[in-house]
Amino acid sequence: MKKLAVITSGGDAPGMNAALFGVVKAAARHDIEVFGCVNGYIGIIKEEFMLLTEAELFKVIDVGGTILGTQRFPEFAEKEIQTKAVDILKKHEIDGLAVIGGDGSYHGARALSQLGFPVAAIPGTIDNDIALTDITLGFHTAVENAVDAIDKVKTSAASHKHIFGIEVMGRQASDIAIWAGLATAADGIIGTNNDWNLEKVLKGIKMSAGKSQIYILAEGAISADQFKAEIESHSEYKVHPLVLGHIQRGGKPSVTDRIMGIKFGEQSVNTLLEGRTGVCLAVQNNQIVELELDKVLHASNNKPFLPFVSQNI
Amino acid sequence: MKKLAVITSGGDAPGMNAALFGVVKAAARHDIEVFGCVNGYIGIIKEEFMLLTEAELFKVIDVGGTILGTQRFPEFAEKEIQTKAVDILKKHEIDGLAVIGGDGSYHGARALSQLGFPVAAIPGTIDNDIALTDITLGFHTAVENAVDAIDKVKTSAASHKHIFGIEVMGRQASDIAIWAGLATAADGIIGTNNDWNLEKVLKGIKMSAGKSQIYILAEGAISADQFKAEIESHSEYKVHPLVLGHIQRGGKPSVTDRIMGIKFGEQSVNTLLEGRTGVCLAVQNNQIVELELDKVLHASNNKPFLPFVSQNI
Amino acid sequence: MKKLAVITSGGDAPGMNAALFGVVKAAARHDIEVFGCVNGYIGIIKEEFMLLTEAELFKVIDVGGTILGTQRFPEFAEKEIQTKAVDILKKHEIDGLAVIGGDGSYHGARALSQLGFPVAAIPGTIDNDIALTDITLGFHTAVENAVDAIDKVKTSAASHKHIFGIEVMGRQASDIAIWAGLATAADGIIGTNNDWNLEKVLKGIKMSAGKSQIYILAEGAISADQFKAEIESHSEYKVHPLVLGHIQRGGKPSVTDRIMGIKFGEQSVNTLLEGRTGVCLAVQNNQIVELELDKVLHASNNKPFLPFVSQNI
Amino acid sequence: MKKLAVITSGGDAPGMNAALFGVVKAAARHDIEVFGCVNGYIGIIKEEFMLLTEAELFKVIDVGGTILGTQRFPEFAEKEIQTKAVDILKKHEIDGLAVIGGDGSYHGARALSQLGFPVAAIPGTIDNDIALTDITLGFHTAVENAVDAIDKVKTSAASHKHIFGIEVMGRQASDIAIWAGLATAADGIIGTNNDWNLEKVLKGIKMSAGKSQIYILAEGAISADQFKAEIESHSEYKVHPLVLGHIQRGGKPSVTDRIMGIKFGEQSVNTLLEGRTGVCLAVQNNQIVELELDKVLHASNNKPFLPFVSQNI
């Protein structure tokens, strides 16, 4: 094995650069060169490769986003494009590909693997919505970012006794909402549609006797504007809506995401070196494990990963 | 002089607690007790006073918001209510009042002073929209908060080559937008209506050749949603709008706001002790000066305070 | 059950206030009052109790240290003093005690329990040196603090090509050193005496060809001054020593420590309510479990908790 | 003017990268290429030049240190070496040089200017010890870093009622100590030898009745170890010494340092373009002014820049 390629794909997630560092570091131990394909799968097709060095990546371990870039490329669902990608990778004498991304990226990774090209995937998404892994790369930092923002709102809200509905990311997953709500002791967490109960919220506000109230809203459950409209049309209360948006994606990766990223990156190289393909890495009980991409893509991600639940007590 | 009162009024601003600490610290040197009136002017009318201690306030020097609370109280514009406030303060043997707040709070302060009650005001607002002071308490931290958020967006935007319109606070003032835009080397700053030039923005985006673009929008000039609508209805570009909102108000006060707050607080006590009233403090050329409230309220605040301009070179 | 008491004991750890919040919140659900004993075990003997309220503790969830205070009290090893403590607790009609602290505090907790007083302990120490729990309260934040400091040194070191030996806390445990070293991709981690190999370090520095070098030193393995002396007396290299010290203990608790603290606090109340005593809480595979204090105190804590190890791959 | 060179020299300071960005941005407006000389003056002699681009520097506006590197080079005091530097710069058709650094770097800049080579200098040092400028690039961030560290120590100290002597940087200048001490409401600030008064400190500790005490020590006045030794040898108090060291140099530049850096960089290009040489930039009353290097090097920097002093009140 002489050359590997790596892409970051889908939404950017803090820790992706750390994962790239891990890939390059492990590859260097075996004198393997690593090429980054610019902007995800499209970079393969466009043959935009850049040689990655440990020294350069060392500088961005603590930087959010991905220095490789990432871009939507729906055409990669077409078999013809996939075959072209494999041809290009082979033409450049690339021996394997590490894919860092979310659900959509996993489909592309499986396709390449089914065409015979060695692929190992790493779960990189802030949403924590990939099946069979406790946690995805970037999620922990996204929660830290959300909590940091909520902390800032908290002192202002307390000064004015305001009611806030704060919408956090997570697509259909409620993990960011739950973690951020727990860490800030929010007055309510609306993680799914089922959690939404207007009467209960109105009662909670009434019981709070004029103190500030902070509700954390998963974007897949209810938007901040909807929350405001619901409360204000059924009561005299005034609601301040706030959409945290992209500030959740950036910033310095947390310790957890940095270490996870580096270890994921290193293991992806080992996996390819040892000849396994069509797999993705995952975290189960704080350990990195390897799973079949096919299995993960068929599993449902039907429940959030809850932190520090009391079990069997 | 045995007893002073202090209120925080209007929008909360980081550094207000530091100012309260400064008031109490300076008062303690002269064995003066300080009472905080809860939630601003309304706390006087409701006779909700709390004795403030140096030890308690020391703990919150680095905490945003105001432990005294603040609340809208438009009725305080009525002469009858103002007279009642003076009567209550006298009944409690309060010898003077420090008011920490913005423009609206200054009107109340002037009114009490005109009724013969000793008042000294401190400019506390994140908007930096008070006349004749270079800078107001809380503004510097608000800019730090905005810049911190924009930094986070920056790595994500760069990864995806997104175009962002980021709306910052400041009411009619453009100072937060200008400072935050300069500190992040934003692609454009729309500080006032006059800065808005659709053609120029579209040209800038075109010239950027597909790189990420970040525009900082003063809320008084153009909203993030308007910005998005303008761009998207006149081009093929897709815009991500982001409203930073209340995260700008909170968080740890910056070094600048902490020192300024403490010094403002201390000086307000000295001012009252030395028998001056109807005045407000201000910063001019990094020094604290004292101005007539009446003069400040009649002056126009027609230009932003620009940082580090090259002059006479 | 009407009244519970709680203490924080031993070295302070970020998240202790969150744990206090958790105790009070869970107790409130059962109409139980919670009294904090000031400064740890000594507060029981001195009968310094303060009623804790959810509203007050809510404000300090995101604040380091412990609002209850903590103090060394070696006399608590004496049976007579322990008996006195039980008598005092009973006199005040306290029905159970939650102890938040490290190894030393656990001995006190076991003693009270053996005297028949209901006790539940929570592992609160930044050192992560308690047996049978993956992680202790405060450890994650301590690592974040260390990494934040190392990040700051990193840009300066790179600018000058300096060699740094950075000493981190952890008493005899190497966990902080290992995690912080991994997260910053340090050039070397000296976690235990056995890791210390002068020749290897000198070779590493030589191989780095004049680039900056950062070594993370566990305080129980080698001090920064020793590291400097060893290198400088055996080579021409100049070393910058840095002892991070108490900045590791403070600051905002990380999301992990906040949630863990709240959940630990809540579970300790449930444990006491359900009549179990002489136990401590622990985290195993991200879940909170309950263990016999006696078992934990007899177990050895002989290995660090390693993050994201690849297992069975 | 077609080509400019720029160096960062002396100790690194947060904001140096922002200044490099400013240089390149202003140069680009006039189609001037900018070359960075690696590691300061030595890079000129070694002819290690790198072409700087706006896109590359944009990414590091918010990163501490200097991407150009900096290195001691005492030989640059020799006239022969200086002449060689001018020859090399001319050989490469460089039309002017911007020097970002402290006092030592200013001497080199003056020498080149006296040899007829156009030079403009920018005050870049965390110590704030350059004459005739209110503030130097990097100082504000160094204070933020120190305050952030002291905040972390503060909660731990309060929990244990510890006495801390915290040594901050600043060489012979006391500015960091004074600003950091004010912003944290420290119990004492030892900025110069004259501030040191053992009896006063012991009295202060005694009066504090067992509460935590934090003293901020300028490195030029008294070291943390000396402070500890003095207190402990003359009393029963136990002191915790802490040397903040290089964590003060790094980290994200504050808003103040970012804007100042960019504006300094831009103005240095304008200065050279307009044909002035042998000058340095400075900040006076928040504006950037231009001064003769010779004048600045002969002036004494005998007093700290005090923030928000009350004047003529």
Image (tube, coloured by chain):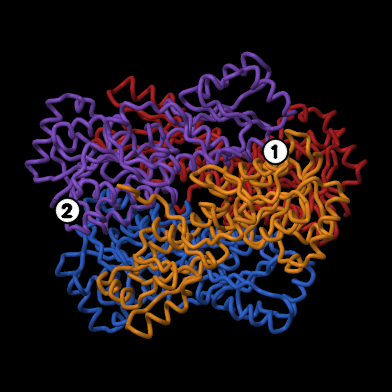
Chain colours: A blue, B orange, C red, D purple
Indicate the chain on which mark 1 is placed.
B
Which residue is label 2 attached to?
A: D33
Q: Amino acid at mark 2?
A: Glu
For disc 2, the chain is D
Quadrant of residue A160 within the rendered picture: bottom right
Judge left or right: residue A286 versus residue D266: right
Closer to us: D8 or C95: D8
Q: Secondary structure at mark 1?
A: helix
Residue at position x 73%, y 68% from top? Answer: B74
What percent of the width, then of the height, locates residue B28?
74, 36
Q: Secondary structure at mark 2?
A: strand
x, y percent for residue D230: 58, 16
Residue D147 % position (x, y):
53, 40
Q: Residue A79: percent from the left, percent from the top?
A: 26, 83
- Mark 1 residue type: Lys
Q: Residue furthest top?
A: D234
The answer to whether tags 1 and 2 share a subunit is no
Q: Where does the N terminus of chain B fall, quadrant-wise? A: top right
Disc tally is 2
Badge 1 vs badge 2, beta-carbon distance below 8 Å:
no
In the image, is D208 to the left or to the right of B245? Answer: right
Q: Nearest the camera: B271 or C55?
A: B271
Q: Is residue D287 above or below residue A99?
A: above
Image quadrant of residue D78? top left
Q: Nearer the viewer, residue C99 or D256?
A: D256
Q: Answer above or below: position of C133 versus D197.
A: below
Q: Is residue B130 above or below residue D239?
A: below
Q: Residue at x 72, y 23 (%)?
A: D206
Q: Residue at x 90, y 37 (%)?
A: C87
Specify the label residue B25 is tagged with: 1
Question: Seen in the image, is C104 located left or right of residue B182?
Answer: right
Residue A296 visible within the image:
no
